Image: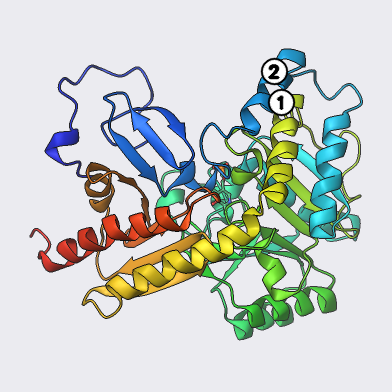
Amino acid sequence: MNAPEALKPATATPSHVMNTYGRLPFALSHGRGCRVWDTEGREYLDALGGIAVNTLGHAHPKLVPALQEQIGKLIHCSNYYQAPLQEQLATTLCELSGLSNAFFCNSGLEANEAALKIARKFGHDKGIDRPEIIVYEKAFHGRSIATLSATGNPKVQAGFGPLVEGFVRVPLNDAAAIAEVANTRPNVVAVFLEVIQGEGGVNPATVDYLQAVRRLCDENDWLLMLDEVQCGIGRTGKWFAHQWAGIRPDVMPLAKGLGSGVPVGAVVCGPRAAHVLGPGNHGTTFGGNPLAMRAGVETLRIMQEDGLLHNAATVGAALKAGLARELGGVAGVVDLRGQGLMIGLELGRPCGELLGRAAEAGLLISVTAERVIRLVPPLILSLAEAERVVAILAPLVRDFLATPPKA
Ligand SMILES: Cc1ncc(COP(=O)(O)O)c(C=O)c1O
């Protein structure tokens, strides 16, 4: 990542933090709504939202006192005891999704690990000793050994073999490819996909494809497992992105936006999957702790109270329209896609350096799949802020594309 000179730290002190991220050279100190400030007092408009996490933006006036109250009462107590806040959050998630039971954990990969375990045990319970799960090219499901094996990105997998076996990979939106698997692989037990691939470049599964996969799952007694870690929790303008296709999954991993910044993951299941795991099959120390559950309960409550699904849909549409208006037809702009406040702008060449340039211009964004500018801002983004994102980003993209790449 090439940071502009102005953002380079004055002195480089040796770090004791393991070097696993390419970081921009500034630290954020506080935020309010969709604005954040760094330790030098520079202000940024946040179109990244902590990578689709800060649903309610920063320091939300309704969330902060609720979390403060919870911290003063009980942060953690273990899963040895009854868990009323887990019941409350599970009930809401089931009402919103039409599913029936939830298991709580701490992150997206953990939710996906639980989903993979459910799929395998579902297979074992019906006598399939070596169950297989259909996964996708360009998918991203996390960085544990099992979830990186399910991920369809060789860069994420490089250096970590041997990978976990039992995955069959197909291209997204190719109904013939998955039908072929159905005809040739008797050990398949589940299909596992993101409704909109996030890290893979904001690639939506089409409504037709999702409906076809749901039908295949029903015909073959497979579980439909939809990873909504990034695209769920209102981001597309419905509670869950699959609801645009009028289908229901059997298993739905969630995380990111669910706690509006407090780490929380969940796997929500329908009746075919909800009772596959029993006591002793799965667990986690921190999962479902009262602080995380309260963050989930309050996030969903505030989203409902403040009409954030509608906001995500309308402001997202305006943001996309603004980008289309300013950048449509510009040579080097390949595609503009996504739904609600999950938008990808694909350029014709790698554009990681735009991260630093955007930050210098006061805008936080991300670049994924090397050449896709991804916008996943808080769902409270206003129309004026959406226009500001366009006003900052469009000239940067135009300048970038007008300058030939360094040899
Ligand atoms: C679709 C999807 N699944 C899973 C994950 C992994 O989540 P986490 O980073 O919380 O483990 C991510 C993270 O980007 C994701 O986008």
Callout 1–callout 2 Cβ contact below 8 Å: yes
Nearer to the camera, 391 or 261: 391
Mark 1: secondary structure: helix
Residue under the point 33% across and 61% down: 390
Residue at coordinates 19% horizontally, 34% vertically from top-left?
A: 7
Where is residue 168 drawn, in percent x and y? 62, 66
Q: Which disc, if any, is residue 71?
A: 2
Residue 336 in the image, given as x and y percentages of width and height: 40, 72
Mark 2 is surrounded, within 10 Å at the Cα level, by few (under 14), some (14 to 19) or many (20 or more) other residues, namely some
- Can you tell which mark lies on residue 132? none
Q: Is residue 233 visible?
A: yes
Query: Of the residues shown, which amino acid type is indicated by label 1?
Result: Leu
Q: Residue furthest left?
A: 407
Give how far apart the Cα atoms at labels 1 and 2 are. 7 Å
N-term-proximal mark, 1 vs 2: 2
Tag 2: amino acid: Ile
| Count of residue discs | 2
